Amino acid sequence: MKKILAVYDGTKYSEHTTRYALEMAKADKAMILGVFIHDVRYSNLAYGYSWDMPYIDYSAIDEAQEDDKKKIALNIELFKNSCTKHGVKHKVHLDKGVPVQEILRESAFADLLIIDSHISFFSFREKNSSPFLKEILADAYCPVLIIPDKYHYFDNLLIAYDGSPSSVHALKMFAYIFPEYTDLKVKIISVNESHSNHLKEGKNAKDIIQAHYNNAEYLVLSGDAESELINYLKLNGDNSIIIMGAYGRNALSRFFHQSISNKILEELSIPLFIAHQ
C-alpha cells in the first residue's frame, strides 16, 4: 500500500488538498497521511503599551494559542470524516516546527507529497517565488504534486520531455506510483530551439514511454522552451496534470527547470507533478 502525504496549514483547512488526495488514494488504494503543521515561528506575539513602552501581553498569546488548538482540532476532524466517508485508510500527524523542515522530514517516508500552491506558509503570487517553494521542489525526498487553489477534474497527462534523465525519471515515477492512470490520454511535449521536429533521444524515449503509457502522442514545438511550453499549456492544459523532471545537478539545468516550474505555478491553475532523482 502506497503512502500519500497531504500537507495542511493546521489552522486553515484545504478541501481541495483532501479531494486530490482522495482521488489519487482511491485510484491506487493508497493510504493518506494528513500532516497538519502548526508554524511555531509565527506564534502570535501580542504587544501592549504601558507608559508608552511596549510589552508582551502573555494573556493574549495564551488566548491565541488556545484558538489555534481549536481550529487545528476541527480541521483534523474534517479530514478524518472525509477519508472515512470515502473508505480511504488514513492517519494524522500534527507537526509543530519550521514548516519546510517538517515537510522534508515527512517526505522521506512517503511515495507522494501533495501540497496546495496557496498554503499560507508561502505565496506563488508574489513577484518572486519564495524560498519555501524552491526548497520543497529541490529537496523533497519523494515526488511532489503541487495543486491549484481549486480542484480540477483531470483525464489527460501532459509530459514535459527535454531529453534529460530527470524528465525520463519523472514520467517513469508517475507511472510507478499511479499505474491506474497510464490508460489516460498522454501527450509528450518537447521543444526544439531549431525548427526540427526531431524528438531528443527519440528511439529510446519512445521505447520507455510506450512501456509505461498506453495512449501516448508526441508533439515537438519550435522556439524558446519556456515560452512555447507555457503558451501551449495555457491553451491546452485544461483537465490535465503536468509531469516534469526536478531541478538538475548543474547550475544551468537547475535554473531552467526552476524557471519553468515557477512560471507554471504562477500563471496556470494546473496540477504539477515533479519527481526527483
Image: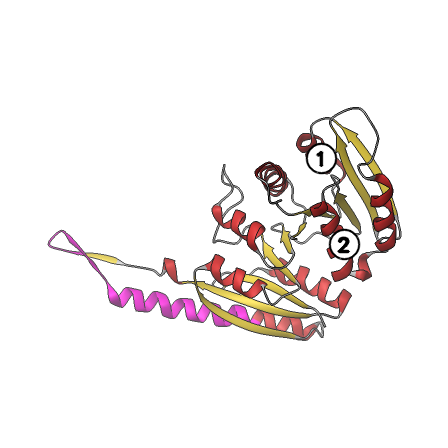
Residue at point 63%, 63% (across, down): 18
Q: Which residues are magenta?
A: 49-77
Residue at point 74%, 34% (across, down): 232
Q: Is residue 142 visible?
A: yes
Is tag 1's residue or tag 2's residue first in the polypeptide sequence?
A: 2
Residue ID for mark 1: 229
For numbered disc 1, what is the local secondary structure?
A: helix
For numbered disc 2, what is the local secondary structure?
A: helix
Badge nearest the viewer, 1 or 2 = 2
Quadrant (top left/top right/bottom left/bottom right) for the N terminus = bottom right
Location of residue 275 in the rendering, given as x and y in whole percent from the top left corner: 67, 53
Location of residue 61 in the rendering, given as x and y in whole percent from the top left corner: 30, 65
User: Magenta residues: mostly which secondary structure?
Assistant: helix
Residue 249: name its quadrant: top right
Count of marks, rendered view: 2
Q: Nearer the viewer, residue 254 or 9?
A: 254
Residue ID for mark 2: 172
Location of residue 233 in the rendering, given as x and y in whole percent from the top left corner: 72, 38
Vertical arrangement, residue 51 with respect to residue 130, above or below = below
Residue 193: name its quadrant: top right
Q: Is residue 62 magenta?
A: yes
